[in-house]
Image (cartoon, rainbow, N blue to C red):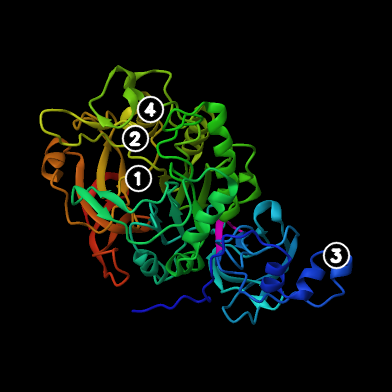
Amino acid sequence: MTIRHPFPGTGIDATRLGRRALLKTFGASALVALSLPVTIRQSLAQPIFVTYPFQLGVAAGDPAPDGFVIWTRLAPLPLEPGYGMPMQPVEIEWQVAEDSGFRTVTQKGTVIARPELGHACHVEVAGLQPGRTYFYRFTAGRERSIVGRARTLPAPGAAVERVRFAVAGCQSYEQGYYTAYRDLSLQDELDFVFHYGDYIYEYDPRPFTFDRHLNRQVPIVRDVPGTELMTVEDYRRRYAVYKMDPDLQLAHASAAFIPTWDDHEIDNNWAASVAEDDVPPEVFDLRRVAAAQAYYENMPLRRTSWPLGPAIRLHRRFDYGGLLGFSALDTRQYRSDQPCGDGVKPICPEVDDPKATILGPEQEKWLFDGLARSKTLWNAIGQQVVVMAKDFGRPNEEARNLDAWDGYRVPRQRLMDHLHDRKVRNAVILTGDMHQNVAGDLHRRPDDPSSPIVATEFVATSISSGFDGGEARSTYPAVLSRNPHVKFMNDQRGYVLHTVRPDRWEAAFRVVDKVRTPDGTVSTRATLAVEAGDPGVKTA
């Protein structure tokens, strides 16, 4: 099927916006109105935008029983310096309704889009009914956004028959089209979408990138303007490139997102104040400040995630009645540096460093306390890097990904012991990062398949990162033989659609046959399951 972009295109101009550009973008009435105090502006006509201001779409996120966040950002010229907006606050109207035609509006108001936040706005809607679907939209001047949809959480402890959600991430714009997001947007009544990270990629644009499936360099699919990201303006423009994609906009408009980040929102494989290359921590923290601000500006986050310097709180929990407790984690911001020099290689003694951490003391305690108190039938942990032990199957050596939990064996053992000793009910860990679909069992002692299974891990492949991929990489036979706890692997692009019921969890791996062109076909490659009270992956 063909889905047209809902908004007009926009040109790219490298010159800085001045009075002439403002007149072209907003019209004379807007230029006058935006320079006056609010009390005077209220008596004037609404500003008229010559170019559509909602180029980046809308989004909802962080649901609660009585509401959720709704987001948009004014950017008439998203890729130009200043993104087509004056350095003035702009008032936006918002509405939330029970129906897509907005015949029954339940909440409405105004919000100020401020230049300090890139003219983004985050409205924390409250006063809604639990477990309900609502629709929302924004109006600025005479222009109106597309309509978004989101569901509130069920009432605390309520009996819930089903929760249905998607897990997605790793969406390199350069390496493929977002066909998987188009398919995701067509799924009926998703409760939420967990985005595990790598929403953008920070790299300097390059004409070729290495394809791990083909094991060679291949040309990129789509161009990304700019250079490697360093400043707030750099990050804003890169988010704008991604957010102008119509399939991503449709996915955001279809359900509330629960986002968290991985590495590429800042720098590849960063760890707290340690950059990938040889940058002093205090200098790298300046980049982290810029990236954290841009991330907040472009995600539907609550004010509790307001960035304070380089710090931004992204670990939070969402309970879907008595059925599902969902803990979203951040495995980047608080971790110690990767051991053994990072990378995929044989392990060294540093992987057993008792002082190593991947969650940080505060977040780890928060997670453990929440799991210990949980009364839900299922307990999901959404995070970034693979928890299960995984030998990469290289000839004559045992290679591990030291950026994943394999490089942090002491904190991983604490997590496995906690799941076992506190008898955390029906634990499922949801992961990304690998650009592969993987399902496997998590044992109390991760390298000992004879120890009890304490959880199941489902790894979602990338939306587009890694190009087309294919059924399997050449290394898969060796990987599966050396990792008996791994039950399924696949190297295509896509996302995972999860359906949780009181007695059963099903994970449907939705895959795209190609992402190098926008006409890919989406299908279900496999559906795997976990039975309540019986941990371990099974065929559905």
- Pointer 3 or 1: first along the chain: 3
Q: Are marks 1 and 2 in contact (CB under 8 Å)?
A: yes
- Pointer 1 or 2: first along the chain: 2
Residue under the point 32% across and 49% down: 532
At label 3, the amino acid type is: Leu
Q: Residue 365: x percent and y percent?
A: 51, 30
Whole-number angstrom distance, CA of label 4 to CA of label 3: 53 Å
> The C terminus appears in which quarter of the rendering?
bottom left
* Front position in the image: 433 or 355: 433
- Packing grade of label 3 (10 A; few <14, some 14-19, many >=20) is few
Q: Which mark is residue 338?
A: 4
Residue under the point 38% across and 54% down: 172
At label 4, the amino acid type is: Gln
* Mark toward the viewer: 3 or 1: 3
What residue span does the magenta drawing correspond to? 59-65
Q: Are marks 2 and 3 in contact (CB under 8 Å)?
A: no
Q: Residue 56: x percent and y percent?
A: 55, 65
Q: Which mark is residue 404?
A: 2
Q: Which mark is residue 433?
A: 1
Q: Residue 198: x percent and y percent?
A: 42, 49
Task: Tell me which secondary structure the magenta stretch mostly adopts.
Answer: strand
At label 2, the amino acid type is: Ala
